[in-house]
Amino acid sequence: MALGEFDLIRQFFCRDSGPDGRGVVLGIGDDCALLQVPEGKQLAVSLDTLVADVHFPATAAPGLIAERALRVNLSDLAAMGAEPLWFTLGLTLPASDTNWLRDFSQGLFRVADEYKIKLVGGDTTRGPLAFSIQVHGAVTPGQALLRSGAKPGDQVFVTGPVGDGAAALAIIQQQLVDVDSAAYNYLLNRYYRPEPQLKAGRLLAGIASAALDISDGLMADLGHICTRSGVGAEIVAERLPLSDAVSRYVDPQQALNWALSGGDDYQLCFTVPEAKVGLVEALARQHRLPLTAIGRIVDGTGVRCLWQGRPLMVAQTGYQHF
Ligand code: ADP
Ligand code: MG
């Protein structure tokens, strides 16, 4: 059944339940939301747009695409060392399909509740299926994790396995077959429900010299840190952490390629000055964060990967829209 715009917003996006909106003076329903930034904090803001048949198939399960989209946005807050506060949603729909909307909003609020981020407004229009999510987070001035602070001698870390996103995509595209159900479920879950590394980001704020989340592939993303910091990086292929699923079912050459160049992992890649490596390792033990040191920042430009001590040629450098 078709719904009017205001009924649609009321039915699917206004809720009394869910996380208490910290600092929400006025939520959905007026011309603007009114939001109080926590005392002494800066606002971190990030926006992502997803277009049907570019970023997801138009027929994909709406709950899954909503869930994934919000998780990916939360990953940007994690990469900044920010605490999630609020988000807004811009939704363009070809029709007001109540089944689609129910599934979409349930997926969205599942994640919003898990990470305690509150929907405070948005916009709803008719047109080809697409949506934008803008997240807002709080960060202490001077402690945000930028891409620009890496220095030669810093160690390079990742927060968890790399290559899972590419392996999952290969399963979805039926290029990787014959994996057992545990590996299948693990990889698809990693793809549709990437875990924003908020805890790691929060702990590293004010300690790591640079950080970002790996969305386009480790080589390409670490390359962004290098460019912004005016440095180069060397990573050691043998140290790259791989999941059991990838180690077991993907041949080592392919696994290495996916770990270096595959996208959609949403782990953090960050750099730490030598003097603070002990502190970071202690925090990792204390909070059970599986951090792995994978290389070093060096003088120069660009990212090199060493394999058995020799430079490895890596073909692909991440996904670009233009
Ligand atoms: P305006 O015409 O002033 O832009 P709208 O009619 O677009 O206002 O929106 C009315 C209220 O509903 C606003 O508070 C807006 O933030 C909220 N809203 C609209 N669409 C959404 C949505 N998809 N999710 C959450 N809030 C929404
Ligand atoms: Mg509007």
Image (spheres, grey):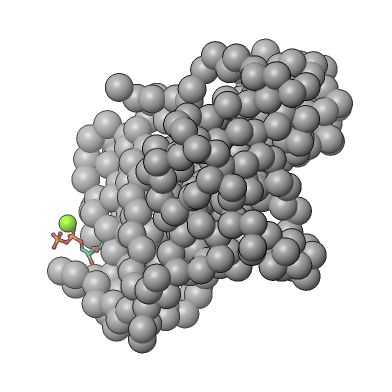
Taking the spot 64% from the left edge, 17% from the top edge, the residue there is 312
The part of the image, by quadrant, that contains residue 163 is top right
Picture coordinates of residue 132 (x, y %)? 33, 46
- In the picture shown, does residue 308 fall above or below 118? above
Asked if residue 308 shows in the view, the reply is yes
Of residues 317 and 69, the one nearer the viewer is 317
Quarter of the image for residue 12 reads bottom left
* Residue at image location 64% in from the left, 57% down from the top: 274
Q: Judge left or right: residue 149 versus residue 124.
A: right
Does any portion of residue 118 appear in the rendered image? no
Q: What is the x, y in percent for residue 27?
A: 30, 74
- Quarter of the image with the N terminus is top left
Looking at this view, is 163 or 300 the one in front?
A: 300
Q: Position of residue 268 (x, y in %)?
A: 58, 49
The one nearer the camera, 212 or 24, is 212
- The mark tally for this picture is 0
Instruction: Indicate left or right for 165 with 293 as reference.
Output: left
Identity of the residue drawn at 23% across and 35% down: 127
Q: Quadrant of the C terminus?
A: top left
Tell me where residue 309 appears, x and y as whole percent. 74, 23
Quarter of the image where ligand 1 sits: bottom left
Residue farthest to the bottom, as pictured: 39
The residue at the point 68 percent across, 25 percent down is 306
Asked whether, in this view, residue 121 is left or right of residue 30, the answer is: right
Q: Is residue 6 above or below residue 27?
A: above
